[in-house]
Image: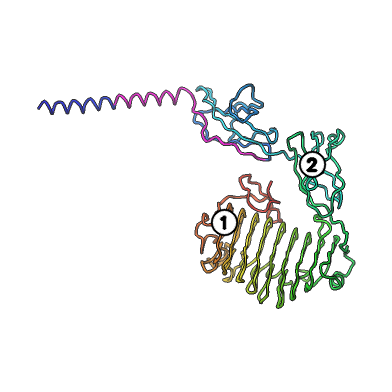
Amino acid sequence: MNKLKNIIYLIGLSIVIMLTGCSDIDDEITNIGYGRLFSPTELAARIVNKTSVRLTWNAVKGADGYNIEVFANGDMSFDGAPVLSFNNITEIPFIIEGLEGESDYSIRVRAVGSATAESKWAAVTVKTDAEQIFLPVDPDELKATEVTLRWTPGQTGTEIVITPGNIKHVVTAQEITNGAATITGLIGETTYTAKLMNGAKTRGTLTFTTLIDLGDATGVYPEDDLIAILDAAKNGDAFVLFPGTYNLGAYDITKSLKISGYKSNDKPVIYGQLTCSSSVNSLELKSITFRGDETPSAMLGQFFNILVGCNLKTLSINDCDIYNYANQLIYNNTSGTIGDIIITNSLIHDIEGSGGDGIDFRGSTLGSFKVENTTFYNGFRTFLRMQAKSGPISFTNCTFYRIANYDNSNNHGLFRVTDGTTFEVKNCIFVETGNATTSVTTAGNFCRQSSNMKATTSYATNVYYSCYQLWVGLYTSPSACSASEVNPQFKNPAQGDFTVQNIDVTAGDPRWLK
């Protein structure tokens, strides 16, 4: 009996202790909750526009606003006076502007209110990027051997450093006032990077390519007979086309050629189609607009048509605008040997795809296919159809808009690689691909089925938005292609302006990124 009493006593004592403990905890929480505001949580800082900081944090219950202090160091010591302070801020996120480039900052935020004491500080560190006060190069101030660089007048700099060549130009007081300096002694058709320095800090970085110094190249003008000139060319000849319109028709490339436009901002327009039916070492095309609709009622089928007997080692397409063809960008339905195809910095659009696929290889062998910094929009059936034996295939930093949108059962979607190779899609953006009204439920997908993707794949940091049937087929989850859904907020896609207005999007063709 005594034993039973002891057990009951111990149980009762335990209950009393637990209740007393809970009461203490409740009192403590009550005191913390009402003694002062909680500190902001999930405080994060992100650099935008090089030298501005975008602060985000979770809103604090009961706060009327927030105080923010910025210190010119990265050690969160918060000694001395802040270089910037903001009181009673109510907007989240909050943008801090007016910071120096390439500098470390410590930033702290606390909640404030009229009814409750302010919170403790929440802190974060951040380092700004190099400034960018250079203005775009005026095409009229860019020549073969010199360039005028401009920046915000009155902004200080000590020197301009240009590479390659390690050219150093000391900035004068007058040039600071004018916000302009002319650099001479450059080499034609060379890509340079200029940095405006203020001591050890970079205030602006700009890349430009000097115009063609004709040298051994032949200048061609709109009034010239382009066909006759190319027919008479020798193997390896280079031609520079001045602005204007040229009619080429379906022209067969039989020798190595380099054909360039004189000005990137005023490209010559060639109405025509290129074909290949013989052995050619290389074909380089740069800064040219190609159109297939000289006769709209008889639109040319392909931009580049590979025919029997073609053995082309290198095809390079750089800074070209290619559009208004009926079926394919590149077509190969025969035997032969193709080496490397490189497409960079180009705009390719309005290729209908009613009778073929965009990049369409059904025969031959291909060394490699590399596409980067390029925008594709409006058209195509299947975008890539690679049924030829191929080496590495890659798409990097590309923008795709309304691609693979043809309503047809032969629309196998974006990518079809049916031979073993490596296949990479990295940092690309896909918007409104596929077809919203098609009766073919698999049209416009990333890849229709496993037999369509025999390659060893690699996907990274891709973005998609408002696409149709994209994840129907081989890939049923965006994560399988390292893709996340984010609206890029294109500025005016109907007019070919794909400027990304969502600062959280960093994928796609760099020309559209702020």
x 57%, y 32%: residue: 124
Instruction: Name which residue lies at 75% across and 71% down.
Output: 280
The reply to whether discs 1 and 2 touch (Cβ–Cβ < 8 Å) is no
Q: Where residue 243 sits in the image (x, y, percent)?
A: 85, 60
Q: Is 31 in the magenta?
A: yes
Q: Amino acid at mark 2?
A: Val
Q: Is residue 394 visible?
A: yes
Q: How many marks?
A: 2
Q: CA distance from mark 1 to mark 2?
A: 37 Å
Q: Tag 1: Cα neighbours inside 10 Å, few (<14), some, or many (≥20)?
A: some
Q: Counting residues from the N terminus, which is met first, the one under dot 1 or under dot 2?
A: 2
Identify the residue shown where x is 25% and y is 27%. 15
Structure colour scheme = rainbow
Tell me if residue 250 can be seen: no
Would you name the residue on which mark 1 appears? 459
Q: Which mark is residue 161?
A: 2
Assign the N terminus to one quadrant of the image.
top left
Q: Residue furthest bottom?
A: 308
Quadrant of the image occupied by residue 96: top right
Q: Secondary structure at mark 1?
A: strand
Viewer-closest of 34 and 171: 171
Question: Of residues 164 and 271, which is closer to you in this image?
Answer: 164
Regarding mark 2 in the picture, which secondary structure is present there?
A: strand
Residue 198 lies, in percent from the top left, at 77, 34
Q: Nearer the viewer, residue 171 or 115?
A: 171
Q: Residue furthest right?
A: 223
Residue 361, image x, y percentages = 64, 71
Q: Is 336 covered by the magenta stretch? A: no
Q: Identify the magenta region.
A: 19-48
Three-letter amino acid code of the residue under disc 1: Tyr
**Vertical side of 212 occupied by 296: above or below:** below
Name the front one of labels 1 and 2: 2
